[in-house]
Image (cartoon, rainbow, N blue to C red):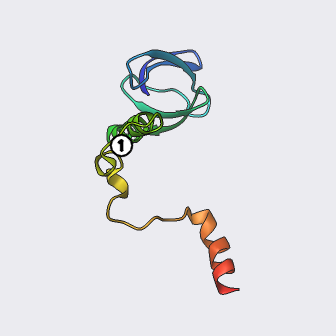
Amino acid sequence: MQVVRMEGATALCLDRHGTEVRIDALLTGELQPGQWVLTFLGAARQVIDAGEAQRINAAVAALETLLPGGSADLDACFADLVGREPQLPEHLVPTMEKQTNG
């Protein structure tokens, strides 16, 4: 979502459809108009840049199209995943190494 303005500890934002949404900004602190935030369950979780916001919005749009049986250009919608092997989050690497090495 993109921040429009702060109102106390909440931010008025626009979602990817242009709908105004109020979100809790306690985890991120003061947000500036124009900033992009990753949100979950009505709260800003992380400030992100415009490029990351665009990639996330493309992926969400693809999922919204695919779930009811539509089609989408997956290479375009998930461009950051094309041509590379999936990577585990760093906190899971030791667990996988233990399982692989016995």
Q: In which quarter of the image is residue 63?
A: top left
Q: Name the residue under label 1.
A: 55
Up the image or down, 5 lies above or below 38; here it is above
Relative placement, left or right, of 75 versus 47 is left
Foreground of the two, 87 or 31: 87
* Residue 7 percent coordinates (x, y): 53, 13
Is 13 above or below relative to 39? Answer: above
Q: Position of residue 28 (x, y in %)?
A: 55, 33
User: Compared to 10, does 46 lie above or below?
Assistant: below
Query: In x, y percent, where is residue 15?
Result: 43, 23
- Residue 92 or residue 72, whichever sits in front: 72
Q: Which residue lies furthest to the right in this view?
A: 102
Q: Which residue is drawn at 61% across and 34% down?
A: 27
- Number of other residues with Cα within 10 Å of mark 1, as a class: few under 14, some 14 to 19, many 20 or more: some
In the displayed structure, 102 sits above or below 30; it is: below
In the rendered view of the protein, which quadrant contains the N terminus?
top left
**Residue type beneath disc 1:** Arg
Relative horizontal placement of residue 8, taking residue 81 as reference (left or right): right
Residue 49 position within the rendered picture, expressed as x and y whole percent measured from the top left: 37, 40
Q: Which residue lies furthest to the front in this view?
A: 69
Question: Residue 71 is drawn in which quadrant?
Answer: top left
